[in-house]
Image (cartoon, rainbow, N blue to C red):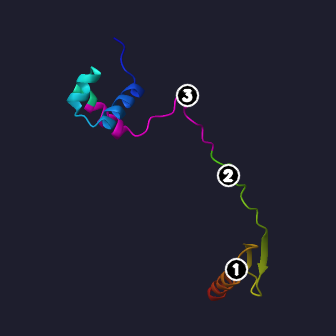
Amino acid sequence: MRRATRAIWAERVARWERSGLTAAAFATRAGVNPHTLTYWKWRLKTAGPPRPVGVEFVEVVPPLPRAPRVSAVVDVTNPAGYRLRVPDDVGCDRLRALLDVLEACR
């Protein structure tokens, strides 16, 4: 005897649920084991929806990483002779704090 597939059992369980019969009564009419019927009801419920036929794995390709931003460098020389090389996007407050630290070290 050929083994029933998941799809066959899914249809069988759906017919059983629509019938309103007990597992034993439905299984007797369908010619199946009532324990197997209740097992498949549980298995189909816990396994989630079946995968569509013919669908395999889908390759997911992450986006290419962005090229790092190339920032220009600004040379700052203070009156004491300290030379700083800072990126062009450094904020005024941060530059002022760096210069204050250098002045305090003098």
Q: Which residue is mark 3?
A: 54
Q: At 37% across and 38% down in the image, what residue appears? A: 47
Q: Which residue is mark 2?
A: 65
Q: CA distance from mark 1 to mark 3?
A: 57 Å
Crowding near the residue tagged with mark 2, few <14, some 14–19, many ≥20 C-alpha atoms within 10 Å:
few
57 part of magenta stretch: yes
Q: Secondary structure at mark 3?
A: loop
Nearest-to-viewer mark from 2 and 1? 2
Which quadrant of the structure image shows residue 97? bottom right
Q: CA distance from mark 3 to mark 2?
A: 33 Å
Kind of residue at badge 3? Gly
Q: Nearer the viewer, residue 10 or 95?
A: 10
Image: magenta residue range: 38-61
Q: Which residue is mark 1?
A: 91
Q: Is residue 59 above or below residue 75?
A: above
Which mark is first along the chain, 3 or 1? Answer: 3
